[in-house]
Image: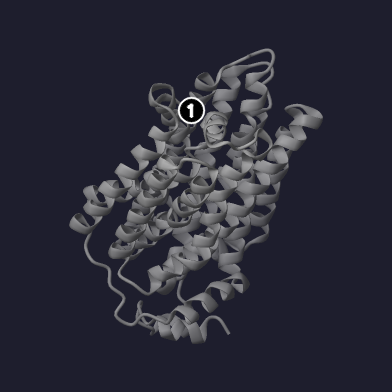
Amino acid sequence: MTRRTRLLLAAVCGVAVASVYAGQPVLAPMGRDLGVPVGSLGRLVAAGQLGYLAGLVLLVPLGDMLDRRRLIAAHLALVAAGAATTAAAPAAWAAFPGLAAAGMFAVVVQTAVAYTASVSPPAERGRNLGIVTSGVVIGILGARIVAGVLADLWGWRSIYLALALLAALLAVLTLILLPADARPDAARYGQVLRSFGGLFAQPVFLSRGLIAFFLFASFGTLWSGMALPLAGAPWHLNEAQIGLFGIAGLAGALGAARSGRWGDAGHAHRVTGIALVVLLASWAAVGQLPWSLPLLILGVVLLDFAVQAVHVSNQHTLATAYPDRTSTTIGAYMVFYSLGSALGATATTALFDATGWTGPTLLGAVLTLCALATWALSSPRTTGNAPVTPSPARQNTPARATRTYAKTDCK
């Protein structure tokens, strides 16, 4: 796993996830151009999110069946096609399927993460995952900044055209630069889907999944609601100024990129607990938004640092616990991510309308406390305090004998 490979996979993650989030800062002009009423603008966001959720269930498990290098390239090509369709859409009827396709194949992120875990030596897995998954945060937060600049210069369509070109370029580079990662004894698609559902009864998976649900609900509460009070009194910031807060988020998230090394040393459980305490503290600073922008910036840095540290620890623990079905496990884990993000985004706007910024602040803190409670009630073994030892049923099983795990682990 060379430095070039890590950076390429981080770029794959960043571009893919940006295709889901890039439209959020430009919904108003996008809706006007496509003829979408103001009350229905949320459907433009929902199209990509629903496509992403479908991809988690239907596409990510393919990584446990096919050569992940080829799969990454194919999915990037289809992200490019979806983004290009959106850029060229004459009306909403054409934009919706383009957004849905780009979102559905953006799950190449999870295949890239599974590929990273598969080809990394155990002692370096956490470090490599930390670097690659930093691309996800760069894509989510950086898309807000870059989209605003491109839209101001050339209109909202230029955002999706740029994403299409980048995704197509990365598809070619993936085929050229990444080593093959074939699955000689792959399970059938039906077996993989059954194992996907069976994961939800596994203690290791369920504890990490629930922590992710509350974690990303808290994350979504901040990033989906923060623009509302910043645009109003007393700050009256414009969209470009609000987008600059993404830089603070990037600083925090990138600061946690090395957190995977703590997992390599067997400290994933402790790292998770400490990061969740930091997340709780961040809401005390974020809650000062109506009175202090410096404290808000501090809170954003701390929040994104904590979220990234826990997210990397989660994926490190799951990749260690389920080495023979990494793609399926990461895909199922991200279902919790999607549901949590949706909960945070939906609840924060309703609470802000009713209570001002106090409501979202309390919601973010309560969600963090729920994550802490889940962590406290989970044993260190199920949350990665030490390297996870394979169960007796898997100790003598080859890492790629995926036909076996479908029969032994998911009864």
| Residue 368, horizontal then vertical, whole percent | 66, 44
Q: Is residue 354 left or right of residue 26?
A: right
* Image point (40%, 74%), residue name: 324
- Asked if residue 281 can be seen in this view, the reply is no
**Quarter of the figure with residue 258:** top left
Q: Residue furthest right?
A: 354
- Asked if residue 204 can be seen in this view, the reply is yes
Q: Which image quarter holds the N terminus?
A: bottom left
Camera-side residue of 72 and 7? 72
Camera-side residue of 260 and 1? 1
Q: Amino acid at mark 1?
A: Ala
| Residue 243, horizontal then vertical, whole percent | 50, 26
Q: Is residue 391 above or below residue 18?
A: below
| Residue 25, horizontal then vertical, whole percent | 53, 31
Colouring scheme, one of rainbow, by chain, secondary structure, one colour: one colour
- What is the crowding at mark 1: few (fewer than 14 residues within 10 Å), some, or many (at least 20)? some
Q: Is residue 176 above or below residue 356?
A: below
Q: Is residue 292 left or right of residue 352?
A: left
Q: Is residue 219 above or below residue 385?
A: above
Q: Residue furthest left?
A: 176
* Image point (41%, 54%), residue name: 109
* Image point (38%, 83%), residue name: 397
Q: Is residue 284 above or below residue 179?
A: above
* Image point (63%, 29%), residue name: 226
Q: Secondary structure at mark 1?
A: helix
Q: Which image quarter holds the C terminus?
A: bottom right
Report the residue marked by disc 1: 248
